[in-house]
Amino acid sequence: MMGKKKFIPYGRQSISEEDIQAVVDVLRSDRLTQGPVVEQFERAVAEYCGAKYAVAVSNGTAALHLAALAAGFEEGDEVITSPITFVASANCIVYSGATPVFADIDRNTYCIDPEQIKRKITSKTKGLIPVHFAGQPCDMVEISTISKRNNLIVIEDAAHAIGASYEVDGRTYKVGCCAHSDMAIFSFHPVKHLTTGEGGMITTNSPELYERLCLLRTHGIIKDPKRLGRNDGPWYYEQQELGFNYRITDIQCALGLSQLKRLDEFVGRRRQIVKKYNDAFSECDTLIVPQQRAGANSSWHLYMLGFQSFDRRVVFEALRECGLGVNVHYIPLHLQPFYADNFNLSVGDYPEANKYYSRVITLPLYPSMTDKDVQQVLNAVHEVVENN
Ligand SMILES: *Cc1c(COP(=O)(O)O)cnc(C)c1O
């Protein structure tokens, strides 16, 4: 075993002096929330992604919740998502009253498999929530074809994938542009590509969805005189339906707006590190490096390494001993007690997700990792592979 090593977490935010100054500037201003910076951040993200509209909210889960409600998911509907994702991707379906249905992943990309989606479609299916797992865009062309044929609403869970893109017929689509979906959501939690502390965003090209998302974000309250049922006077507003307080603050959006300037740099560094990992690990035939679909350009939120014919617990603990904050993303949702107990799921229905879960470990990956940190990861993995 190596001696005491520096601890390298699996993910970490990068905050600059400029980011800090941007937050301080808002703190010295008149408006801490519902001020101008929220809209600036929304416009900047919409522009970055190539979408018409963006709605910033308090976190990525709130973004999913509002998107599910704006999509009109309700009791009696079925909505299909991936079993290999964070729980929030499916929880939003349950919040809306609809029933979550899981379609197995593709064995190479670990994203939801369009063929498996087709198998799970019934007369009750109302929507799809593809997850751009680890930053790799799902096959959105195929997913959009399936959705059109079956009249489904598509919400991209792009919590891992701001900055990712995919090519179709020589044209590049940024994730979040919603060219092949109705809405896309992002998370700005500190382990994600860019952070606002807590925060989220929904992008869409539909003016109707945009209006509904704004309404649901703020209690369902309308102030626009043109949309009021009656008008008691200049103070008057109306709550026309049940909404929430899912607002985000100007303080948070100032951080996000400042971080956005460095997003491409962050993603570039992630891609560099992944190349080093792939080059080093592909030589070893007991290791499975993550694969990219042709045309997909991942923004690499996570790097999952597959350990074939190893005792995963032993490998995991040995890597922790070497100072690596390794993790497992994710425990399949069909194995979570909440989903297993409340929905009619059978473990055998997800062979690829089960296989994936049995052997994968997430290695450290974040933009401020130095080459020395990367080398520490490479050494640790090689040592563990040799000794097990
Ligand atoms: C992080 C994450 C979310 C939720 O985002 P929060 O901002 O933490 O609420 C949703 N989906 C996926 C796939 C995530 O990784």
Image: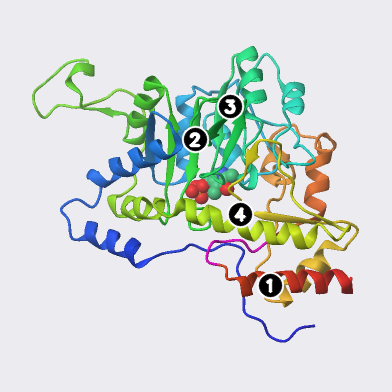
- Residues 142 and 325: in front is 142
Query: Could you tell me if residue 324 is visible in this image?
Result: no
Q: Quick one: which residue is furthest to the left in this view?
A: 233
Number of the front mark, 4 or 3: 4
User: Which of the two marks, 2 or 1, is nearer to us in this view?
Assistant: 1
Q: Which residue is mark 3?
A: 98
In what element is the residue under mark 4? Answer: helix
Q: Which residue is mark 4?
A: 271
Residue 291 versus residue 371 in the image, above or below? above
What secondary structure is found at the residue carrying circle 2? loop
Q: Residue 176 got which mark?
A: 2
At a point 49% along the width and 22% down the height, the residue shown is 72
Label 1 – label 3 distance at C-alpha: 47 Å
Identify which amino acid the numbered label 1 is placed on.
Gln
Residue topped by disc 1? 375
Whichever of callouts 2 and 1 sits on the residue coming sooner in the sequence is: 2
Mark 1 lies on a secondary structure that is helix
Query: How many numbered marks appear?
Result: 4
Q: Describe the element under mark 3 as helix, strand or loop.
A: loop
Which residue does the image show at 48% across and 58% down from the upper left?
190
364 falls in the magenta region: yes
